[in-house]
Image (tube, coloured by chain):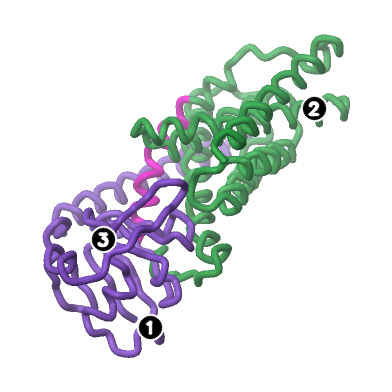
Chain colours: A green, B purple
Amino acid sequence: MDKKKFVVGMIVFGSLWGFSECIIGPAMGDAGFPSGAIMGGLFAVGLMVLSRSMFRQPGMQLGMGLIAGCMRMFNPFGSCIVCSAIAIAAEAALFELIWSAISKDLHKSKNPVMMVSLGVISGYSVFVGGYIVTQILTPIVSSSTFYLENLIAFLPQILARGTLAAILGAIIVPVALLMRIPDISKVKDRLYYPTAMGISVISWVIVIGNFLLSA
Amino acid sequence: MSIRKETTIPVLAIVLLLIATTSSAYVYINQSSVESTVGESILINGDSFEIATLFENVEKRTEIVAEVEYEGIALDKLIEYVGVTSPESHSYRFVADDGYSKTVEWSHLSDGILTLDQRSVFSNLPKAFSVRNVIEIEVN
């Protein structure tokens, strides 16, 4: 895999993830949808699985999480911007751990049970892990103290809310794995780079524009 | 793909789904058994207080969070009103009717309010500290 293509791919997928976290997530939350589970189980897992099956490079999703986390810093809304950014990076790290441990050769197998199972594991772990990280970091970053009792008391709610993320993961992972994906190494540079950079720039412009208009 | 993985991955997924559904059932049963007092009363330091009485007697304040203006009773004045001794030496845990809770220090209460719909709002803390449907304030 061409390193330049890999890095550009990481930027474009990370930018799309960040865009969805900053623009789509808050819009869904305002409309009364469970945005956390949808963002974690559908968008985050979907984009990470798609990029994984396109590039097949471990570490890419962590990089995507860091890019999306940076973009999240431009979102003027939400509880704790720094915590949310770190939570996105934590979600990506969790995904990397899961997929490195149990799915190295999954792309060779198109077994529906395996794909659905991996979707459940990814969706649930990414959502619950991200949620717990945010609950721990928010008090610490905001110069308050982290109280374990608060987390323990709310843990059943977090575990229960992960159900939707698990279901969405079970749908999006097989869809992403079964999609007909072009071989990136064969895509012509004059098509690949302008398209990838164009998508990235548009995502960043919209997020920063939204930040400036809201400030 | 190894046979071991073909067994482990579905089993792990089933275990996670069991955790999710059991937690959902636990939350549902727990919420059904907990009677929400939102709009009527609130438990502070073990004593129950009528919301209407508190709003008649405790100083009100306005706090602005993310460009939204909230009005409610000042939390530091509320703690003084209910008779907590040495309030600066305690921490305060705001508990919602769904089990969500956040603990803050006395210094945070000077920029905090409790709204009429029993929501804690702090202009000096992240939005995560805004607890909806507060049914109890524990003084620790």
The residues tagged by marks 1 and 2 sit, at their Cα atoms, a distance apart of 52 Å
Instruction: Please rate how many residues cluster around mark 3, counting C-alpha atoms within 10 Å: few if below 14, some from 14 to 19, many from 20.
Output: many
The image quarter containing residue B87 is: bottom left
Q: Say above or below: B53 vs A131.
A: below
What percent of the width, then of the height, locates residue A168? 44, 30
Q: Nearer the viewer, mark 2 or mark 3?
A: 3
Return the residue nearer the eye: A136 or B29: A136
Q: Secondary structure at mark 1?
A: loop
Return the residue nearer the eye: A4 or B20: A4
Q: Which residue is mark 3?
A: B134
Q: Secondary structure at mark 2?
A: helix
Which three-letter amino acid code belongs to the residue tagged 2? Answer: Val
Instruction: Please rate how many residues cluster around mark 2, counting C-alpha atoms within 10 Å: few if below 14, some from 14 to 19, many from 20.
Output: some
Q: Nearer the viewer, mark 1 or mark 2?
A: 1
Q: Is residue A176 visible?
A: yes
Q: Which residue is mark 2?
A: A8
The residues tagged by marks 1 and 3 sit, at their Cα atoms, a distance apart of 19 Å
| Host chain of mark 2 | A
Q: Which residue is mark 1?
A: B90
| Host chain of mark 1 | B
What percent of the width, then of the height, locates residue B125? 48, 61
Residue at 44%, 70% in the rendered image: A148
Which three-letter amino acid code belongs to the residue tagged 3? Answer: Val
Q: Secondary structure at mark 3?
A: strand
Secondary structure character of the magenta stretch overall = helix
Does the magenta run of residues contain A160? yes
Left or right of B47 in this view: A199: right
What percent of the width, then of the height, locates residue A189? 86, 13
Magenta segment range? Answer: A153-171
